[in-house]
Image: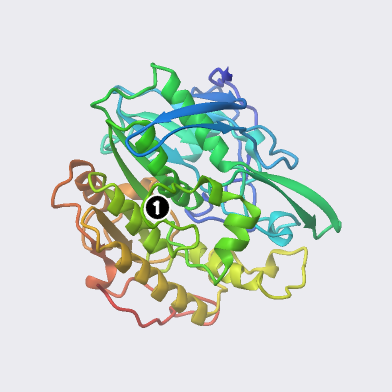
Amino acid sequence: MFKILKNSTVIPMILLSLLSCKKEKEDTTNDLLLVGLVSATSTPYIAITPTAGSISIAGTNLTTTKSYDPKCSGVSGNQTFKFFLKKGNSKNLLVNFMGGGACWDGKNCFGTNTTTYFKAMDSLSTLAVRYAFSGILDERQASNPFKDYNVLFIPYCTGDLHWGSKATTYTDPTTNTESTLQHRGFDNFLASIDYVKKNTEWTPGSTDKIFVVGQSAGAYGAIFNFPYIKEIFPSNEVNVLADAGNGIVPANWQTEAAVTKWGANTNLPSWITGISITAELGEFFKKVAAFYPTSRIGQYSSNFDGTQRYFYNLQQLLQTNLTYSDSSTLYGKGDGSQVADSVTCDWVTKSRINFATAKTESNYRYYIAGGDVHTITSNNNVFTEASAGSSLLTWINGMIANNSAWANKDCKNVGTCSPPATSASPNGVSCTFSSF
């Protein structure tokens, strides 16, 4: 069952907590972005509120029926999952997984200014989606290669990278009481894609293209769920681009978070040869690319991505006996500027190892931009970025067309990758790293 919410025309005020939109970076301290929309405004999106159901998959490699129970995490203001659709001038489909941090511990799932995932789904309206997300989602941009596509926008309100199917109980550090969160990101994905599959108005024809993309947490959702989309639509060309999702994790983090807290192991595309929930991310991309050689697999990241460095540092902190504080200073600023230079350089080195691992597959490409900005495809910087020696827009168009413009691009090959200022190095952090 699905409930359709009609377009909003007058919204007096929307309170939108968007971790991925503060200065194009994911503000992991859960600051609220206040979007005041007072005048009458239209939006091309519709919102659908799904309920529990099941999807039948009859793909080339997977034949099954999977149940889903769509939910947001369940904290105040984050109760009801909904997804958004926008009609294009073709039956091609753009599937966009929204970003917004992650949580796997009471100290970052709850607290004052310490929560590190998007938890304001109840305030996310059709109008908010229209004005908070631009770039490849904006059909008004003449140079947008996806301007004629139908759009499925899958919001994020579960703290599990769109991977989870589990309810987990945590201790709230501010009250010392137990609270349960619904990590149902995978269920929400299935409910969203099932609607597209079952409603011919939105279902791509057999010759239409599907492009899967996600920003930040959504980047992990995009690569994790891409195999399911390929199996649900086996006759279609399906490609995937992960934007700002090249995470490095400490030992055992995947087991602690993805398996124990989120239950993501039950959703792993296990038909892919050698796939593992505990693999390094580069290996995960490599296995997916190898199994689907006719699909194109792309990754974008800035070389010093501030938010990814922040989360790498946070993961390490939460593996220690961290004393909780009701202040964002517990983890430092979400832009990564207070991350120790040694941790920054460790992240840069290891993220490049991920790229090097995946690039051995001929249908995989990367674009490594200079600087530390986090996410780009859902803002208009996607149309001007050129720090890796070529236009990112040209690179994306090359990916769509499968031509020579879609080549590996690295800021290191054309400069210094614009190292950012940090608390320890106000003139720019110094890291030694190699190009490929």
Q: Is residue 49 above or below residue 255?
A: above
Residue drawn at 26 percent across, 37 percent down: 145
Q: Amino acid at mark 1?
A: Asp
Residue 191 image offset from top left, x and y in percent:
53, 30
Residue drawn at 59 percent across, 22 percent down: 10
Can residue 58 be seen? Answer: yes
Is residue 306 rendered to the left or right of residue 258? Answer: left
How is this picture coloured? rainbow
- Disc 1 is placed on an element classified as strand
Q: Give the residue number, with chain letter if any, for mark 1.
A: 243
Residue drawn at 61 percent across, 68 percent down: 314
Image quarter (top left, top right, bottom left or bottom right) of the C terminus: bottom left
Residue 279 image offset from top left, x and y in percent:
45, 63
Is residue 1 rendered to the left or right of residue 74? Answer: left
Query: Quick one: 283 or 92, which is closer to the camera?
Result: 283
Image quarter (top left, top right, bottom left or bottom right) of the N terminus: top right
Can residue 44 be seen? Answer: no
Residue 11 image offset from top left, x and y in percent:
61, 26
Q: Is residue 324 above or below residue 139?
A: below
Q: Is residue 256 above or below residue 207?
A: below
Query: Quick one: 232 or 104, which is closer to the camera?
Result: 232
Work out which residue is located at the far left of the displayed protein and give it.
404
Residue 189 image offset from top left, x and y in percent:
51, 37
Q: Is residue 274 above or below residue 294?
A: below
Q: How many badges with numbers are in the image?
A: 1
Q: Residues within 10 Å of mark 1 (few under 14, many from 20)?
A: many
